[in-house]
Amino acid sequence: MTVHALWRPRIKPEHRAYRTVDGNVRIGSVVHGVGAEVKDPDGWVWTLVEALDGTGSAADVVAEVARRHPELPEPDITRAMTDLTTAGYVEDAGAPPPADLSERERERYGRGMTLLRWMDLRPRESAWEPQLLLRRARVLLVGLGGTGSAAARDLVASGLGRLHCVEPDVVELSNLNRQTLFREADLGTPRIDAALSALHALNSDTTVTGERREVRGPSDLEDLLAGGAPRYDLLLLAADRPPVIRRWANRVCLASGVPWAEAGYRGPLVSVGVFTPGRGACWECLRSAEIERRDLRLAPGQDEEAASPRMPWNPVNAVTAGLSGGLLAHAAIALLCGIPPVEPGCRFGLNLMVPGEAIMQRSERRPDCPACGT
């Protein structure tokens, strides 16, 4: 963030501070990962956060704190204000919204902007910058089943700039218990056609395109990624067949340098994996580490199917599909906007059988990995 003469610093509304019973200052709300607590034995930190109300310049804030605490050196006040700004708790109340966002867009995405502002812990010229990053982004989405259709809906509603969807199948009656982008009137219609119609109706400001195509090998993914001009910022994989498709996506994204995420559900387990070539574990690193971590207590030569049976259908309803799609859209926004900061090379999610039990898998990059190892 560049501090300029007209800069009017204020604590973000979502980060409004309060004093604890023992006189400390809590800021950033009580949300774990956002909030912080500052010891304030002399009371001047509280004076500072009160003065950061957006009505005056940085010099005005320093002068007000110095007036009320004359024993305090002004450089200490300036340093504390800088620390709060660097930590992401301060914004410029006088910053104009980016010229690239229309008044209509600012009205439409205003609630989303405040959520991103709440979760954002880095200095910005404007709180609208993340929304602008989202609007400029280009995403390739493969698969419009339960996970993919929910992710597409959430990203388009959130203001993604360009989304290209790939899906080979038609809408069937058994899809409608979870693929909430479609309606009974869409039965027998190619999913891609029904999805494009629904997504265009949802947000005319997002450019949504698509093609009816099946991914049969890594070359198909290479062709799809190469078809983005300029190139795609992100690949989202929501297809679950053939089973090797995640391995294909991992290898293709490693070769092209394109970040990617994949999500899905396995019964009550809902999760998303987030990967960036060159940063952290790749998908194959993570999978190998997870196989080693699990203790299935199988007999020598016994097939893993005995412990984790695969059925010709995937048990799912609108809740599990919607959660996995929401996690995929969340991962996309995190990768595109940096909010919240997510270190790639991990899988996270929920176990619906045990409320409060999170899924978190992480691995170091493996030198012996056949995909990304040295």
Image (tube, rainbow, N blue to C red):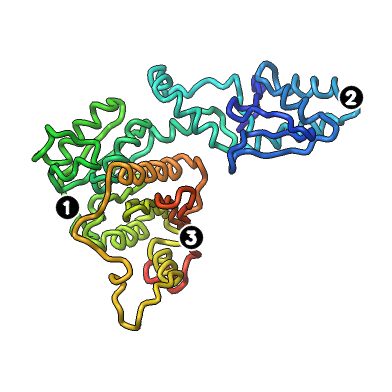
Task: Please give left or right for residue 330 compared with residue 5 in the image.
Answer: left
Q: Is residue 42 above or below residue 279?
A: above
Mark 2 vs mark 1, CA separation in Å? 71 Å
Which type of secondary structure does the marked residue at label 1 adopt?
Answer: loop
C-alpha distance separating marks 2 and 3: 50 Å
State which tag comes first along the sequence, 2 or 1: 2
Instruction: Identify the residue shown where x is 47% and y is 28%.
Output: 113
Is the N terminus in the top left, top right, bottom left or bottom right quadrant? top right
Asked whether the residues under the numbered discs 3 and 1 touch, taking CB atoms below 8 Å apart as contact, a structural biologist would say no
Give the residue drawn at x 42%, y 19%.
Answer: 107
Q: Read off the residue under disc 2.
A: 70
Q: Element type at marker 2?
A: loop
Q: Can the viewer see residue 230 in this picture? A: no
The label on residue 160 is: none
Toward the viewer: 113 or 170? Answer: 170
Residue 307, how many percent across, how many down? 33, 69
Residue 221 in percent (x, y) is at 25, 54
Which residue has dot 1 on it? 214
The amino acid pointed to by label 2 is: Pro
User: What residue would you read off at disc 3?
Assistant: 362
Q: Amino acid at mark 1?
A: Glu
Q: Residue at x 47, y 24 (%)?
A: 98
Residue at the limit of the structure toward the bottom, as seen here: 300
